[in-house]
Amino acid sequence: MTYVVTEACIKCKYMDCVEVCPVDCFYVGDNMLVIHPDECIDCGVCEPECPAEAILPDSDDRAAAWAEQNRTYAALWPNITRKGEAPADADDWKGKPGKADLFSPEPGKA
């Protein structure tokens, strides 16, 4: 099992999860984070830290659609090891459904 960042992270990108990850398996995109599934040790400490509730175990049906995107973009985006600032409007986007169309494939800044 591994953990997966889902569309709930898009436009929120709080990054609280990055601070607690013992293996630094988060990668940063323009408007969301992803987890590298081969680096994740399945400890689960990131899941409760996410204010947007965007991190789920890959065994959760809601994570299935995002598992491959996590794998793909973890190979393309820079690794992030420290919490950065969330977007100024993150709270406005928190909990909004249907954010998949807003996904940006562009890398973020570590």
Image (cartoon, rainbow, N blue to C red):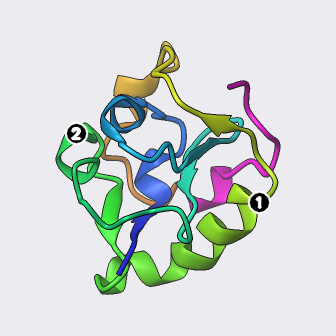
Under mark 1, the amino acid is: Ala
What residue is at 22 percent from the left and 49 percent from the top? Answer: 45
- Against 33, residue 5 (above or below) is below
Between the residue at mark 1 and the residue at mark 2, the CA separation in whole angstroms equals 24 Å
Horizontally, is 54 left or right of 77 in the view?
left
Q: What amino acid type should be assigned to the residue bearing mark 2?
A: Glu
The residue that appears at 68% across and 25% down in the rendered structure is 110
Q: Main secondary structure of the magenta part?
A: loop
Apparent side of residue 4 relative to residue 77 in the rendered image (left or right): left
**In x, y percent, where is residue 60?**
28, 82
| Residue 20: x %, y % from top left | 30, 35
Q: Quadrant of residue 50?
A: top left
- Residue at the image point whose x is 49% and y is 58% from the top: 7
Labels 1 and 2: the sequence-earlier one: 2
Per the image, the residue denoted by label 2 is 49
Q: Which residues are magenta?
A: 100-110
Q: Indicate the secondary structure of the residue bearing disc 1.
A: loop
Between marks 1 and 2 in the image, the one whose residue lies nearer the viewer: 1
